[in-house]
C-alpha cells in the first residue's frame, strides 16, 4: 500500500532531517509527526550509554510542548541513507486521559 499524500510529506520530512545528521553517533534516527492541523513536528534520537530516547518519543514530547493537536501520522528515517521505516505501534505507547 502506498502512503497517502500527507503520510508522504511526513516521510519526506523525516528523511530530509536524517540526511542532516552526519556522522554523529549520538543522533542516528530522525522522526517527523503530523498533527490534525497539518503541522509537522521533527526530532532526533539522543543516544546515551543507558539507551536514550528514540526519535519517536522525542518528537512526541516536542509536539506536546508545542501544544499540537492529536497526531495523525509519524515516520522515522535512519542516517547514512538508510531511508524511512514504519514506526512500530507496539513500541510507542501513549496514555490517553
Image: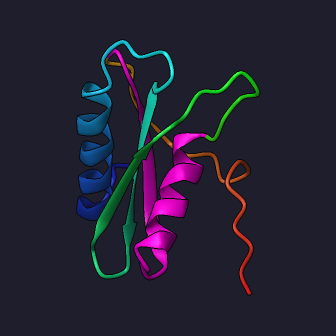
Number of marks in the rendered image = 0
| Residue 77 horizontal/vertical position (percent) | 40, 34
Q: List x then y, in percent, for residue 4.
A: 30, 60
Q: Residue 83 location, x and y as percent?
A: 36, 27
Q: On the picture, is 35 further left or further right than 93?
A: left
Colour convention: rainbow
Residue at (52%, 36%) from the top-left corner?
45
Q: Which residues are magenta?
A: 54-80
Q: Residue furthest bottom?
A: 97
Q: Nearer the viewer, residue 7 or 29?
A: 29
Is residue 17 placed above or below 80 in the rendered structure? below
User: Residue 57 in magenta?
Assistant: yes
Residue 70, x across and y down, in percent: 49, 79
**Residue at image x 43%, y 48%?**
75
Residue 42 higher or lower than 53, as above or below = below
Going by the image, does 58 lie left or right of 73? right
Task: State whether residue 43 is above or below residue 85.
Answer: below
Q: Residue at x 26, y 26 (%)?
A: 19
- Identify the image quadrant of the C terminus: bottom right
Between 19 and 62, the one nearer to me in the picture? 62
Asked whether, in this view, residue 88 is left or right of residue 63, the answer is right
Residue at 46%, 31% (x, y): give it.
Answer: 29
| Residue toward you, 57 or 89 | 57
Q: In the rendered image, which quarter is residue 79 located in? A: top left
Amino acid at each position: 500500500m502506498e502512503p497517502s499524500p500527507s503520510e508522504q510529506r511526513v516521510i519526506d520530512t523525516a528523511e530530509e532531517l536524517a540526511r542532516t545528521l552526519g556522522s554523529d553517533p549520538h543522533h542516528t534516527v530522525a522522526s517527523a509527526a503530523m498533527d490534525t492541523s497539518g503541522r509537522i513536528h521533527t526530532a532526533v534520537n539522543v543516544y546515551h550509554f543507558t539507551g536514550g530516547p528514540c526519535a519517536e518519543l522525542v518528537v512526541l514530547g516536542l509536539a506536546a510542548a508545542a501544544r499540537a493537536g492529536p497526531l495523525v501520522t509519524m515516520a522515522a528515517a535512519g542516517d547514512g541513507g538508510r531511508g524511512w521505516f514504519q514506526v512500530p505501534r507496539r513500541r510507542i505507547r501513549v496514555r490517553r486521559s
